[in-house]
Amino acid sequence: MKTQLELAREGVITAQMEQVARDEGKDAELIRELVALGEIVIPVNHNRPNQKVVGIGTGLRTKVNASIGTSSDIKDIELEKRKARIAEEEQADTLMELSTGGDLDLVRREVLATVNLPVGNVPLYQAFSEASRKYHNPNKLDPEYLFELIERQLEDGISFMAIHCGINRYSIERLRRQGYRYGGLVSKGGTFMVSWMEYHDRENPLYEQFDRVCELMKKYDAVLSLGNGIRAGAIHDSHDRAQMAEMITNCELAEIGREMGCQMMVEGPGHVPLDEIEGNIMLEKRMSGNAPYYVLGPLPADSGAGYDHITAAIGAANSARYGADLICYITPAEHLALPNEQDVREGIRATRLAARIGDIARDPSMREREKQVAIARRDTRWEKQMELLMFPEEARRIRRDRTPENQRTCTMCGDFCAMERGISLFARDIRGDKRGCSGCSGKK
Ligand code: SF4
């Protein structure tokens, strides 16, 4: 069976491309063209035909990923399934199953059966976790087992995989030679792979046998997301030579993978100060030929633990504004613990809001909903306002808990409600539309 990318190149508009076009209000032929160029990917897996269709890439709404998964300390499959359900309920677009504790085949299969979202993972987690249990040393991993495992996970229905193909001896040498790394290494899979390479004094097998990785992904039409194993874990490390060496390699691999007909994304960048986010996105887009960019964070400060969903949301809004395509959420537990159910909920809400703020800045056609909210608020039509909000239940709960005497107002200003007074004074003057306004008409 052919991949979305191969079919698009042959001029075929697939059912998935049509679905993306409908969801995004775009022309199906435009979606096909962008899939053919590798600027849009659609995570698919032939073994999971009924999963939700999501397009990621140029001109589309910025998507949000939620990650769940057990750890070596907390191995509760039921908890992870509840977190997966919350991710779907809170409208995450994709889900990553990142377990490293317990029966890893079982948890993956259970999560895949629990949600309809496209599910991604990081095969290195299971590979090194199992090698660690079996040999008491993750470096004893047999690379052949890694390829077997990738295929087993694809067979189960995983539709995008973060695989650390771009870490190689050249990027490790850059890390060594630069003589500093304030945030150390922060990618779990990346660090395992670096450790394996150092232990065996060998090149990364995923880099050496990149074609083999692509062939496996193509067989199922899953998206290969090139993991960022040497991403910055501190703002002082952002864009250091080690990170950039890996990014250059990943962008090159994205091109090679696309040539082979494999759907490709590039991952990055970790901790990045706010003033460098635009440059980071520009570099990824220019070097990869506009491959969809899957960003982790970015976190524009290192000192916000406990509120890092907000730290990351600020970075995410900026990255969405400048063209990031898929944003991995960060929860309040980031840097501190495995997220619980409430952390998952908060993380998704903060990231969805950030993605929306970025989309509004990037694409004026996405502003119409904001206009309708503003009008309902101005006219004190509370129910209409609630219907239009991103988080109506939370808004309703707050209002219900603090009921005003005058139902047209709220308890913030009560008798001195500016909205009520303003509309009573200017109702006949301010209900028109701005002349020549293209802000929300979709014209640019
Ligand atoms: S009472 Fe104040 S905060 Fe509440 S709707 Fe009126 S102007 Fe807005």
Image (tube, grey):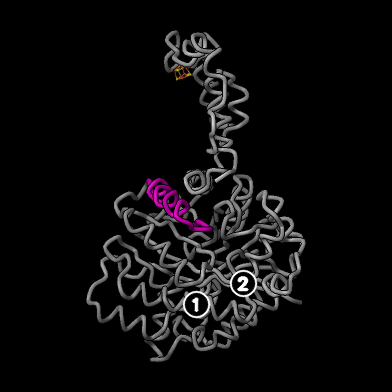
**Vertical side of 174 occupied by 4: above or below:** above
Q: Is residue 312 left or right of residue 222?
A: left
Q: Which residue is mark 1?
A: 128
Other-residue count near label 1 (Cα within 10 Å), few / some / many at <14 / 14–19 / ≥20: many
Measured from the top left, where is residue 207 in percent x and y? 49, 84
Secondary structure under tag 1 reads helix
* Direction left: furthest residue: 179
Residue 22: x and y, percent?
72, 51
Give whichever of 74, 299 is nearer the camera: 299
Residue stretch in magenta: 307-327
Camera-nearest residue between 104 and 61: 61
Identify the residue at image location x=62%, y=83%: 148
- Residue at image coords 57%, 22%: 432
- Tell me which amino acid carries mark 1: Phe
Place residue 276 in its image quadrant: bottom left
Is residue 116 visible to us here?
Answer: no
Q: Secondary structure at mark 2?
A: loop
Q: Quadrant of the N terminus?
A: bottom right
Instruction: Work out whether mark 1 precedes mark 2 in sequence or the reverse, and give the earlier one.
Output: 1
The three-letter code of the residue at mark 2 reads Gln
- Main secondary structure type of the part rendered in magenta: helix
User: Vertically, is 10 above or below 299?
Assistant: below
**Mark carried by residue 263:** 2
* Marks 1 and 2, how far apart at CA: 25 Å
Is ligand 1 within 8 Å of the beta carbon of the residue shown at mark 2?
no
Q: Residue at x 67, y 52 (%)?
A: 26
Q: Nearer the viewer, mark 1 or mark 2?
A: 2
